[in-house]
Image (cartoon, rainbow, N blue to C red):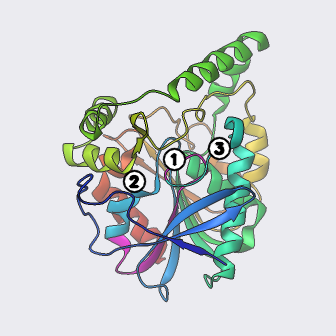
Amino acid sequence: MSIERPSQVFSPETIEIQRIIDAEPQRFVCPVGDIEISYLVWGDRTKQPVVLVHGGKDHSRNWDWTVAALIGEYCLITPDMRGHGDSGRSAGGGYASELFVSDFAFLMDHLEAEGFSTPLALVGHSMGGNIVLYYAAAFPEKVSRLVSMEGLGSSSKMYDAFMAKPAGERLRSWLDRRLAGERKQHWRFQGPEEMVARMASVHKNLQPEQARHLALHAARQYPDGWGWKHDARFGFFPPPSLTSPDEYSRLYESIECPVLLMRGEQSWASDPIADGRIKVFKDARLVNYPDAGHWFHHDAFDAFIKDVKSFLEE
Protein backbone atom coordinates (compact mmCIF):
# COMPACT_ATOMS: atom_id res chain seq x y z
CA MET A 1 0.00 0.00 0.00
CA SER A 2 1.27 3.47 -0.82
CA ILE A 3 1.91 6.01 1.92
CA GLU A 4 0.86 9.58 1.26
CA ARG A 5 3.23 12.37 2.28
CA PRO A 6 2.68 16.14 2.26
CA SER A 7 3.56 17.46 -1.22
CA GLN A 8 4.89 20.83 -0.03
CA VAL A 9 8.54 20.67 1.03
CA PHE A 10 8.73 24.38 1.90
CA SER A 11 6.03 26.66 3.24
CA PRO A 12 5.42 29.95 1.40
CA GLU A 13 6.89 31.80 4.39
CA THR A 14 10.18 29.93 4.00
CA ILE A 15 10.75 30.07 0.27
CA GLU A 16 8.80 31.26 -2.75
CA ILE A 17 8.64 28.90 -5.72
CA GLN A 18 6.91 29.87 -8.94
CA ARG A 19 3.89 27.75 -9.78
CA ILE A 20 4.28 26.15 -13.22
CA ILE A 21 1.33 23.72 -13.17
CA ASP A 22 -2.25 24.75 -12.50
CA ALA A 23 -2.75 21.73 -10.24
CA GLU A 24 -1.36 20.25 -7.04
CA PRO A 25 0.21 16.79 -6.99
CA GLN A 26 -0.33 14.03 -4.50
CA ARG A 27 2.91 12.82 -2.97
CA PHE A 28 3.35 9.16 -2.03
CA VAL A 29 6.21 6.91 -1.09
CA CYS A 30 7.08 3.40 -2.25
CA PRO A 31 9.14 1.50 0.36
CA VAL A 32 12.15 -0.31 -1.11
CA GLY A 33 14.01 -2.08 1.68
CA ASP A 34 15.01 0.60 4.17
CA ILE A 35 14.60 3.43 1.61
CA GLU A 36 11.44 5.31 0.68
CA ILE A 37 11.10 6.26 -2.98
CA SER A 38 9.06 9.46 -3.21
CA TYR A 39 6.80 10.02 -6.20
CA LEU A 40 4.22 12.58 -7.29
CA VAL A 41 0.96 11.84 -9.09
CA TRP A 42 -0.38 14.67 -11.25
CA GLY A 43 -3.84 14.85 -12.78
CA ASP A 44 -6.74 12.52 -13.42
CA ARG A 45 -5.93 8.90 -12.53
CA THR A 46 -8.48 7.65 -15.06
CA LYS A 47 -6.34 9.02 -17.91
CA GLN A 48 -3.48 7.14 -19.52
CA PRO A 49 -0.50 7.18 -17.11
CA VAL A 50 2.99 8.27 -18.17
CA VAL A 51 5.99 7.84 -15.86
CA LEU A 52 8.72 10.52 -16.13
CA VAL A 53 12.17 9.62 -14.72
CA HIS A 54 14.72 12.38 -14.07
CA GLY A 55 18.46 12.33 -14.67
CA GLY A 56 21.40 12.23 -12.28
CA LYS A 57 21.70 14.97 -9.61
CA ASP A 58 18.22 16.09 -10.64
CA HIS A 59 14.73 15.77 -9.17
CA SER A 60 11.12 15.11 -10.13
CA ARG A 61 10.22 18.81 -10.35
CA ASN A 62 12.52 19.15 -13.36
CA TRP A 63 9.49 17.83 -15.26
CA ASP A 64 7.07 20.58 -14.17
CA TRP A 65 6.93 22.24 -17.59
CA THR A 66 6.46 18.84 -19.27
CA VAL A 67 3.71 17.92 -16.79
CA ALA A 68 1.95 21.24 -17.44
CA ALA A 69 1.95 20.52 -21.19
CA LEU A 70 0.70 16.92 -20.85
CA ILE A 71 -1.66 16.99 -17.87
CA GLY A 72 -4.72 17.67 -20.04
CA GLU A 73 -4.37 14.27 -21.75
CA TYR A 74 -2.41 12.11 -19.28
CA CYS A 75 -1.90 11.26 -15.64
CA LEU A 76 1.76 11.97 -14.91
CA ILE A 77 3.86 10.10 -12.34
CA THR A 78 7.21 11.66 -11.42
CA PRO A 79 9.46 9.76 -9.00
CA ASP A 80 12.59 10.90 -7.22
CA MET A 81 15.16 8.13 -7.55
CA ARG A 82 17.20 7.09 -4.51
CA GLY A 83 19.60 9.75 -3.33
CA HIS A 84 17.65 12.43 -5.21
CA GLY A 85 14.88 14.89 -4.40
CA ASP A 86 12.71 13.76 -1.51
CA SER A 87 13.64 10.06 -1.66
CA GLY A 88 15.91 8.29 0.80
CA ARG A 89 19.65 7.96 0.46
CA SER A 90 21.76 4.82 0.21
CA ALA A 91 23.68 3.96 3.33
CA GLY A 92 27.35 4.41 2.57
CA GLY A 93 26.69 6.08 -0.75
CA GLY A 94 25.90 3.00 -2.87
CA TYR A 95 24.48 4.09 -6.23
CA ALA A 96 25.24 1.35 -8.75
CA SER A 97 23.05 1.51 -11.86
CA GLU A 98 21.54 -1.89 -10.98
CA LEU A 99 20.14 -0.39 -7.77
CA PHE A 100 18.31 2.32 -9.68
CA VAL A 101 16.82 -0.23 -12.07
CA SER A 102 15.82 -2.44 -9.14
CA ASP A 103 14.18 0.52 -7.39
CA PHE A 104 12.27 1.32 -10.56
CA ALA A 105 11.07 -2.28 -10.89
CA PHE A 106 9.78 -2.09 -7.29
CA LEU A 107 8.08 1.21 -8.11
CA MET A 108 6.39 -0.22 -11.22
CA ASP A 109 5.07 -3.19 -9.24
CA HIS A 110 3.90 -0.77 -6.57
CA LEU A 111 2.08 1.41 -9.13
CA GLU A 112 0.37 -1.63 -10.61
CA ALA A 113 -0.82 -2.64 -7.12
CA GLU A 114 -2.14 0.92 -6.70
CA GLY A 115 -4.33 0.59 -9.78
CA PHE A 116 -2.10 1.86 -12.61
CA SER A 117 -2.46 -0.99 -15.07
CA THR A 118 0.42 -1.95 -17.33
CA PRO A 119 1.71 -1.57 -19.94
CA LEU A 120 2.71 2.01 -19.17
CA ALA A 121 4.42 4.70 -21.23
CA LEU A 122 7.85 5.68 -19.89
CA VAL A 123 9.96 8.80 -20.45
CA GLY A 124 13.47 9.12 -19.03
CA HIS A 125 16.25 11.68 -19.23
CA SER A 126 19.94 10.72 -19.10
CA MET A 127 20.25 8.37 -16.09
CA GLY A 128 16.46 8.06 -16.19
CA GLY A 129 16.61 7.26 -19.90
CA ASN A 130 18.98 4.42 -19.12
CA ILE A 131 16.77 3.16 -16.28
CA VAL A 132 13.66 2.94 -18.47
CA LEU A 133 15.58 1.18 -21.26
CA TYR A 134 16.89 -1.42 -18.83
CA TYR A 135 13.45 -1.92 -17.34
CA ALA A 136 11.82 -2.33 -20.76
CA ALA A 137 14.46 -4.92 -21.69
CA ALA A 138 13.70 -6.95 -18.56
CA PHE A 139 9.89 -6.48 -18.64
CA PRO A 140 8.92 -5.79 -22.26
CA GLU A 141 5.28 -6.69 -21.63
CA LYS A 142 4.94 -3.86 -19.07
CA VAL A 143 5.96 -0.96 -21.35
CA SER A 144 3.76 0.40 -24.14
CA ARG A 145 5.96 3.23 -25.45
CA LEU A 146 9.34 4.53 -24.37
CA VAL A 147 11.18 7.84 -24.75
CA SER A 148 14.88 7.78 -23.86
CA MET A 149 16.57 11.18 -23.78
CA GLU A 150 20.33 10.64 -24.09
CA GLY A 151 20.01 7.47 -22.03
CA LEU A 152 21.79 4.94 -24.24
CA GLY A 153 25.02 4.82 -22.24
CA SER A 154 28.55 5.01 -23.57
CA SER A 155 29.23 4.77 -27.30
CA SER A 156 31.99 2.54 -28.66
CA LYS A 157 34.25 5.59 -29.03
CA MET A 158 33.70 6.64 -25.40
CA TYR A 159 34.13 3.07 -24.16
CA ASP A 160 37.36 2.49 -26.11
CA ALA A 161 38.86 5.77 -24.85
CA PHE A 162 37.95 4.83 -21.28
CA MET A 163 39.37 1.31 -21.53
CA ALA A 164 42.60 2.61 -23.07
CA LYS A 165 43.56 4.05 -19.67
CA PRO A 166 45.36 1.74 -17.21
CA ALA A 167 42.99 0.04 -14.79
CA GLY A 168 44.81 1.52 -11.78
CA GLU A 169 44.45 5.02 -13.22
CA ARG A 170 40.71 4.49 -13.74
CA LEU A 171 40.30 3.29 -10.17
CA ARG A 172 42.38 6.18 -8.76
CA SER A 173 40.34 8.73 -10.70
CA TRP A 174 37.09 7.29 -9.37
CA LEU A 175 38.36 7.17 -5.78
CA ASP A 176 39.54 10.79 -5.98
CA ARG A 177 36.04 11.85 -7.06
CA ARG A 178 34.48 9.64 -4.38
CA LEU A 179 36.56 11.30 -1.66
CA ALA A 180 35.76 14.75 -3.05
CA GLY A 181 32.06 13.87 -2.90
CA GLU A 182 32.41 12.90 0.74
CA ARG A 183 33.83 16.34 1.48
CA LYS A 184 30.94 17.93 -0.45
CA GLN A 185 28.50 16.44 2.05
CA HIS A 186 29.07 19.60 4.05
CA TRP A 187 29.15 22.07 1.14
CA ARG A 188 26.61 24.66 2.20
CA PHE A 189 25.16 27.89 0.82
CA GLN A 190 24.17 31.04 2.68
CA GLY A 191 20.64 30.80 1.30
CA PRO A 192 18.40 29.78 -1.62
CA GLU A 193 19.32 32.77 -3.79
CA GLU A 194 22.96 31.71 -3.75
CA MET A 195 21.84 28.30 -4.99
CA VAL A 196 19.84 29.92 -7.81
CA ALA A 197 22.97 31.79 -8.88
CA ARG A 198 24.95 28.56 -8.80
CA MET A 199 22.38 26.77 -10.96
CA ALA A 200 22.41 29.59 -13.50
CA SER A 201 26.22 29.66 -13.66
CA VAL A 202 26.52 25.91 -14.25
CA HIS A 203 23.61 25.58 -16.73
CA LYS A 204 24.08 28.66 -18.87
CA ASN A 205 21.38 27.70 -21.40
CA LEU A 206 18.63 28.01 -18.79
CA GLN A 207 16.37 31.03 -18.72
CA PRO A 208 16.48 32.88 -15.35
CA GLU A 209 13.02 31.62 -14.37
CA GLN A 210 14.04 28.05 -15.22
CA ALA A 211 17.21 28.23 -13.14
CA ARG A 212 15.27 29.65 -10.22
CA HIS A 213 12.55 27.02 -10.30
CA LEU A 214 14.96 24.10 -10.67
CA ALA A 215 17.34 25.36 -7.98
CA LEU A 216 14.65 26.07 -5.39
CA HIS A 217 13.07 22.65 -5.83
CA ALA A 218 16.55 21.13 -5.45
CA ALA A 219 17.27 23.06 -2.25
CA ARG A 220 17.01 21.83 1.30
CA GLN A 221 17.67 23.60 4.59
CA TYR A 222 19.98 21.54 6.81
CA PRO A 223 20.91 22.31 10.43
CA ASP A 224 24.20 23.87 9.24
CA GLY A 225 22.88 25.78 6.23
CA TRP A 226 21.37 25.30 2.78
CA GLY A 227 22.42 22.52 0.42
CA TRP A 228 21.30 20.40 -2.53
CA LYS A 229 18.83 17.60 -1.97
CA HIS A 230 20.78 15.02 -3.96
CA ASP A 231 23.36 12.93 -2.17
CA ALA A 232 26.83 14.30 -2.92
CA ARG A 233 28.11 10.71 -2.85
CA PHE A 234 26.24 10.07 -6.10
CA GLY A 235 27.59 10.83 -9.54
CA PHE A 236 31.18 9.73 -9.77
CA PHE A 237 31.07 9.00 -13.48
CA PRO A 238 32.72 7.17 -14.99
CA PRO A 239 32.97 4.35 -12.44
CA PRO A 240 36.06 2.10 -12.34
CA SER A 241 34.42 -0.09 -15.00
CA LEU A 242 31.89 0.61 -17.73
CA THR A 243 29.24 -1.57 -19.34
CA SER A 244 30.36 -2.19 -22.90
CA PRO A 245 28.20 -1.09 -25.85
CA ASP A 246 27.93 -4.76 -26.84
CA GLU A 247 26.31 -5.57 -23.51
CA TYR A 248 23.93 -2.64 -23.86
CA SER A 249 23.01 -3.86 -27.33
CA ARG A 250 22.17 -7.36 -26.11
CA LEU A 251 19.83 -5.81 -23.54
CA TYR A 252 18.12 -3.39 -25.92
CA GLU A 253 17.39 -6.18 -28.38
CA SER A 254 14.82 -7.45 -25.86
CA ILE A 255 12.72 -4.27 -25.96
CA GLU A 256 9.44 -4.87 -27.79
CA CYS A 257 7.71 -1.48 -27.69
CA PRO A 258 8.26 1.54 -29.98
CA VAL A 259 11.21 3.66 -28.79
CA LEU A 260 11.86 7.35 -29.37
CA LEU A 261 15.50 8.33 -28.87
CA MET A 262 16.29 12.02 -28.33
CA ARG A 263 19.55 13.94 -28.38
CA GLY A 264 20.79 17.52 -28.16
CA GLU A 265 23.41 18.16 -30.82
CA GLN A 266 25.33 20.48 -28.45
CA SER A 267 25.56 17.71 -25.84
CA TRP A 268 28.21 15.06 -25.25
CA ALA A 269 26.02 12.19 -26.46
CA SER A 270 26.85 10.68 -29.82
CA ASP A 271 24.34 10.21 -32.64
CA PRO A 272 22.95 6.63 -32.38
CA ILE A 273 22.29 6.53 -36.13
CA ALA A 274 25.83 7.59 -36.98
CA ASP A 275 27.41 5.17 -34.48
CA GLY A 276 24.99 2.35 -35.36
CA ARG A 277 23.46 1.80 -31.90
CA ILE A 278 19.91 2.43 -33.09
CA LYS A 279 20.05 -0.74 -35.21
CA VAL A 280 19.65 -3.05 -32.21
CA PHE A 281 16.10 -1.84 -31.51
CA LYS A 282 13.12 -3.52 -33.12
CA ASP A 283 11.25 -0.22 -33.56
CA ALA A 284 13.16 2.99 -32.86
CA ARG A 285 13.51 6.46 -34.29
CA LEU A 286 15.73 9.42 -33.43
CA VAL A 287 15.10 13.14 -32.95
CA ASN A 288 18.05 15.55 -32.83
CA TYR A 289 17.76 19.10 -31.47
CA PRO A 290 20.39 21.21 -33.27
CA ASP A 291 20.67 24.19 -30.91
CA ALA A 292 20.24 22.34 -27.61
CA GLY A 293 22.45 20.64 -25.06
CA HIS A 294 21.92 17.79 -22.62
CA TRP A 295 18.87 19.51 -21.09
CA PHE A 296 17.11 19.91 -24.42
CA HIS A 297 13.73 19.49 -22.70
CA HIS A 298 14.47 22.99 -21.41
CA ASP A 299 16.64 24.34 -24.26
CA ALA A 300 14.19 23.30 -27.00
CA PHE A 301 11.02 22.84 -24.97
CA ASP A 302 8.41 23.55 -27.66
CA ALA A 303 9.96 21.12 -30.15
CA PHE A 304 10.50 18.53 -27.41
CA ILE A 305 6.87 18.63 -26.26
CA LYS A 306 5.58 18.47 -29.82
CA ASP A 307 7.66 15.34 -30.48
CA VAL A 308 6.68 13.65 -27.20
CA LYS A 309 2.98 14.35 -27.72
CA SER A 310 3.09 13.03 -31.28
CA PHE A 311 4.86 9.87 -30.18
CA LEU A 312 2.55 9.16 -27.24
CA GLU A 313 -0.57 9.74 -29.34
CA GLU A 314 0.36 7.22 -32.04
Give the residue at x 68% y 40%: 95
Is 162 one of the magenta-colored residues? Answer: no
Residue pointed to by mark 1: 55
Q: Is mark 2 on a helix, strand or loop?
A: helix
Residue type at mark 2: give it. Answer: Asn
Q: Is residue 42 above or below residue 91?
A: below
Residue pointed to by mark 2: 62
Residue type at mark 1: give it. Answer: Gly
Q: What element carries label 1?
A: loop
Kindly check if marks 2 and 1 are in contact, taking CB atoms under 8 A apart as contact. Answer: yes
Q: Position of residue 34 (x, y in %)?
A: 72, 55
Q: Disc 2 and disc 1: Cα gap in Å?
A: 9 Å
Is 74 one of the magenta-colored residues? Answer: yes
Kindly check if marks 1 and 3 are in contact, taking CB atoms under 8 A apart as contact. Answer: no
Residue type at mark 3: give it. Answer: Arg
Residue pointed to by mark 3: 277
Q: Position of residue 57 (x, y in %)?
A: 50, 41
Q: Is residue 156 above or below residue 306?
A: above
Kindly check if marks 2 and 3 are in contact, taking CB atoms under 8 A apart as contact. Answer: no
Which span of residues is magenta-colored? 69-85
Q: Earlier in the sequence, mark 1 or mark 3?
A: 1
